[in-house]
Image (cartoon, rainbow, N blue to C red):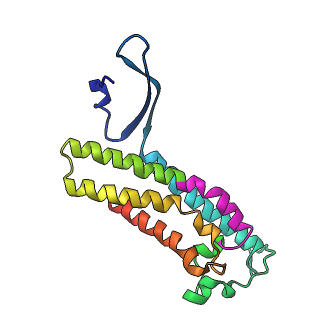
């Protein structure tokens, strides 16, 4: 495979994917697909999807799950918010409570791939940028090693985020099986902020 200099000269904000085919009569390799995009767009899509999921599920919970004022004074919920597992542990409900009951849990489970996949892709392509920067002596080996470990953890954490909805807080596996994917996501977001 012949490597030309133009492949090395991409900017640090742009990642390129090239699928190649072997030319039939020469050593030249021509791309089947060339796609250029900003790596940060994956993070924007993932974080925006997380925010959208929380807003939609909060509205659904206020309308159909929790009793009280509902949404704009309208609501058909029957669950007392003070009886949730989260309220019993912490003394208050937080955003996770809005995702724990159907129908909002079903909607969240449908929307969560729009968080998981872009965030995993962002971490993968960001690490490729770190590798390139290391080769250009922008970063030292310690940061490369940190990025390698944090990226592996982050990708695993984001791809396991769906377990947040599989295991309910009061289900067969208990609160811990529900809370661990949530905490892993929080730690992954902290690692992303520190890179």
- At x 32%, y 33%, the residue is 10
- At x 58%, y 77%, the residue is 94
Q: Which residues are magenta?
A: 100-116
- Res 106 seen here: yes
Please indicate whether residue 41 sits to the left or right of residue 105 in the image. left
The residue sitting at the right extreme is 76
Q: Quadrant of the N terminus?
A: top left
Please indicate whether residue 164 sits to the left or right of residue 102 in the image. left
User: In which quadrant of the rendered view does residue 169 lie?
Assistant: bottom right
Residue 154 is situated, as x and y percent measured from the top left of the image, at 42, 60
Q: Quadrant of the C terminus?
A: bottom left
- At x 58%, y 85%, the residue is 92
**Is 23 within the magenta?**
no
Observer-nearest of 69 and 120: 120
Residue 70 is situated, as x and y percent measured from the top left of the image, at 74, 75
**Is 104 within the magenta?**
yes
User: In which quadrant of the rendered view does residue 13 lie?
Assistant: top left
- At x 55%, y 87%, the residue is 90
How would you classify the magenta stretch by its main secondary structure? helix
């Amino acid at each position: 495979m012949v490597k030309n200099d133009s492949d090395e000269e991409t900017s640090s904000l742009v990642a390129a994917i090239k699928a190649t085919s072997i030319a039939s009569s020469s050593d030249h390799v021509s791309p089947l697909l060339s796609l250029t995009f900003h790596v940060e767009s994956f993070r924007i899509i993932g974080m925006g999807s997380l925010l959208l999921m929380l807003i939609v599920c909060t509205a659904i919970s206020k309308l159909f799950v929790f009793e009280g004022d509902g949404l704009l004074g309208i609501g058909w919920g029957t669950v007392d918010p003070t009886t949730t597992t989260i309220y019993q542990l912490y003394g208050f409900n937080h955003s996770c409570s809005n995702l724990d009951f159907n129908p909002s849990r079903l909607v969240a489970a449908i929307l969560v791939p729009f968080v998981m996949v872009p965030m995993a892709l962002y971490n993968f392509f960001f690490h490729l940028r770190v590798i390139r920067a290391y080769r250009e002596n922008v970063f030292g080996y310690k940061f490369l090693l940190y990025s390698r470990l944090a990226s592996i953890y982050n990708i695993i954490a984001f791809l396991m985020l769906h377990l947040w909805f599989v295991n309910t807080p009061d289900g067969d596996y208990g609160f811990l099986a529900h809370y661990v994917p949530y905490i892993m996501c929080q730690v992954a977001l902290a690692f992303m902020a520190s890179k």
